[in-house]
Image (cartoon, rainbow, N blue to C red):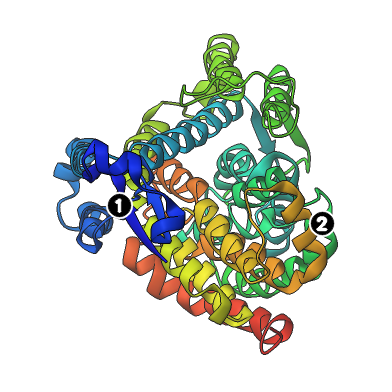
Amino acid sequence: MFFLNTDLLPAEVRNNLTADTLNVTFVSNADIIQHPPIYLIAPFIMLLIAIATGPLFYKHHWEKHYGKYSIMFAVVVAAYYIFFLNEFSGLHKTITEYISFIALLSSLFVTSSGILINVDRKSTPIVNTVFLLIGAILANFIGTTGASVLLIRPFIKLNKDRIAPYHIIFFIFIVSNVGGALTPLGDPPLFLGFLSGVPFFWVVQHMWYMWILALILILIPFYFFDLFNKKTSNKQQYTGKIEIKGHKNLIYLLIIVLAVFIDPAVFPWVPDLSPLPFGIREIIMFAVVYFAYKTSDQKILKANEFNFEPIKEVAFLFVGIFITMLPALELVAIEAKALGDKLNVDVFYWATGVLSAVLDNTPTYMNFLSAAMGKYYLDVAIKAHVQHFVSVDIIYLEAISISAVLFGAMTYIGNGPNFMVKSISERAGITLPSFFAYIFKYSLLILLPVYTIIWLLFFYGKG
């Protein structure tokens, strides 16, 4: 069997040809998919290098021009897709995902900034450990993004006299990533799996023991980090009370969580606004941004040191990340599908994890889910196939799901809330490790052994 592009033939020849006479498959120009060349991942790599080195070696220049660099790299990749590949669907899908991403982050950021949580307790290793554990649990109900934005400021205030970089790093590990592994609400790849046909409660039923083990193995070193922090609070009297102000913003928070489900894939009655790169869900979320900001108590916003700079930084940098990583994701998808029948569960676990650390974990999850389903001749785009796959061999779905969530903590860009927490913390005056220092001083030393243990216990040699 070979493919013949009939658009290149004269009309009189094309009209007289049939597939039976030539044993060929006729395709038109529209059917030929041009894959991006490997060198098109260069802008993505260059942007990552700029993000890693800018704040370290040319901080003032970077702070002034980071948005320009991000847009420049994004335009290069977008222009190549439009003018050289003549391909719009992938770019349109990426822009749609970015708008959904920034709508969620911005609505949660503004809404949470209007909520003031004051924990009037002495900062101790036990108090901080319990705080992070509560954040991990909460992440499964309002998402890692919601829990991160809501709790990072009170966590900083709780530790204001003894705050250290490791406090923020472990907050990112636990609240911004690992915590959200129990429900589809917790992390975007799990929610996309739910939309594709994975039952809502499948995640908690099959991942709770890995979630508990990961939390224990990360919270233990945090406790000892905090135990050896000899700085003490200057405040001697504590009431032990936990005070929450800005209760009306809790309603906005509920609206955001409910809006996540306003999707035609969940409720058929929801209008599909295609080809617009957004839907009713995003309209609701952006409306929440406006009304939450306008109606929030200005005293609370001031007490939270609110400004738009953190969300502005995330918006500019991630528009570059989303678009420049498109060629890398497409090349990964091609290889994953081509080699799907040769990949075992060990490869699925580590490949999903490593790529989720530097690429967006949602499309990475979907690419490897598609490859795993391909082993059984199933199509990820068909909900019934996904539902059948869940009952066929859960080991692959377990490996892909837990890996996509856990490994998002390996870098600042592995998950959206990571960079948000970093930006908020730095604007609060906390000096955090650089991009590479975060990886080599913390995530490789603390997280990689934990993830290796999970692999050895639950996946090694099982598929």
How packed mark 1 is, by other alpha carbons closer than 10 Å (few <14, some 14-19, many 20 or more), is few
Q: Amino acid at mark 1?
A: Gln
**Residue 81 image position (x, y, % from top left):** 26, 42
How packed mark 2 is, by other alpha carbons closer than 10 Å (few <14, some 14-19, many 20 or more), is some
Q: Amino acid at mark 2?
A: Trp
Task: Give the side of residue 31 with respect to residue 459, left or right.
Answer: left
User: In the displayed structure, would residue 99 be above or below residue 40?
Assistant: above
* Foreground residue among 212 and 323: 323
- Which mark is in front, 2 or 1? 1
Mark identifier at residue 202: 2
- Circle 1 residue: 34
Is residue 374 visible from the viewing direction of this image? yes
Q: Are marks 2 and 1 in contact (CB under 8 Å)?
A: no
**Residue at 49%, 75% in the rendered image:** 339
Residue 228 lies in quadrant: bottom right
**Residue at 38%, 59% in the rendered image:** 22
State the quadrant of the C terminus: bottom right
User: In the displayed structure, would residue 452 be above or below residue 13?
Assistant: below
